[in-house]
Image (cartoon, helix red, strand yellow):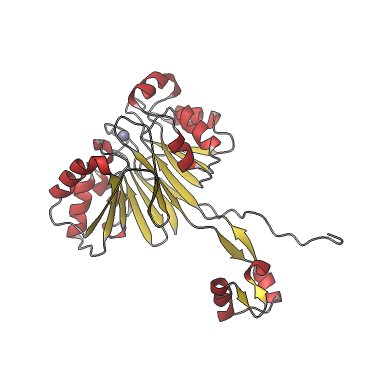
Amino acid sequence: MRELVVLGTSSQVPTRARNHNGYFLRWDGDGLLFDPGEGTQRQMIHAGVASSQVTRICLTHVHGDHCFGLPGVLARMAVDQVTHPVHLHYPASGEETVRALTGLAGAGPDLRWHPHGGAGDVADGLEVAPLRHRVETYGYRVREPDGRTLLPDLLTAAGITGLDVGRLQREGQVGGVRLADVSVPRRGQSFALVMDTAVCDGARRLAEGTDVVVMESTFADEEAGLAAEYGHLTAGQAGALASEAGAGLLVLTHFSSRYADVAPLREQAQARAGATRVVAAADLDRYAFPRRRELRRRTSPGPGA
Ligand SMILES: [Zn+2]
């Protein structure tokens, strides 16, 4: 199962309607918790996310609204007797803050430390790229390798049934039938989290071709000056970035407390997002991943082809 659970959507300070930001990504057997702001533990209860489902915690940077919920979540894991290892990813320059926060939690789960200081893979199927903010910040991208979708009618016609189906997938060939003959290429799904940042190449690279991208949208377009000054995106900039990257769905979040209603921000983003669909997240929203897109549909060649 693949699903994004939005735990909070506020930047800097929470509001009556919005908790500090935080995001949980169910990705098959993994559970990635991104940027747990204050109150994340309680938001997880509201969202029905158990602490035992978290296998990785990924921090973009060490500003408080992105990490002050960490001790609470770790302490809760200890209460819940989580025994599996929990991988903690963070910018290396934030080490002191991360050590202080984890130290507050006391004897938490079995933490595995993964500081990063440059672009690249930080785990299997998980990569980071630098963003442009006031402190060192990295966005994340989760990706599934490309694969192949089996076509049942062609399998049947080729006489491949039962255990031979698994063998064909593992070995690429069974009794003269090749995997390529009975399947079509399938693009792996991908997800990206882009915050906090001004417009930059890293943001564009992370969002490239993603099914779902979460982007900060701290300010409306009218506040482009403030966005530039503090290293944030406007709604319109987020929409343009997602569109240039060809993302399927853009989820806006990390809103300034000055906006009681974020519908206008969604409209500003959508106006520049082209074919990318834009939603403005509310706390506890859930987004299921769409069906995988096939690279091309198999067509039987016509006569004389
Ligand atoms: Zn922030």
In the foreground, 44 or 139: 139
In the displayed structure image, the side of residue 291 where residue 228 appears, left or right: left
Q: Is residue 38 visible?
A: no
Taking 186 as reference, is 283 above or below it? above
> Where residue 118 appears, x then y in whole percent?
35, 43
Where on the picture, by quarter, is residue 254? top left
Q: Where's residue 102, x and y in %?
A: 18, 49
- Give 278 or 170, whichever is nearer the viewer: 170
- Image spot of residue 108 (x, y percent): 17, 56
Total marks drawn? 0
**Between residues 140 and 34, which one lies in front from this camera angle?**
140
Indicate left or right for 68 with 211 as reference.
left
Furthest-front residue in this view: 118
Residue at the image point whose x is 45% and y is 48% from the top: 191
Q: Identify whether 15 is placed above or below 94.
A: above
- Residue at 45%, 29% (x, y): give it: 235
235 or 232: nearer the eye? 232
Q: Quadrant of ligand 1?
A: top left
Location of the N terminus (image quadrant)? bottom left
Residue at 48% x, 46% y is 212
Quarter location, residue 66: top left
Q: Specify whether residue 273 is in view.
A: yes
Relative side of 36 to 158, left or right: left
On the rendered image, what quadrant is the C terminus found in? bottom right
Query: Residue 52: percent from the left, percent from the top?
Result: 28, 60
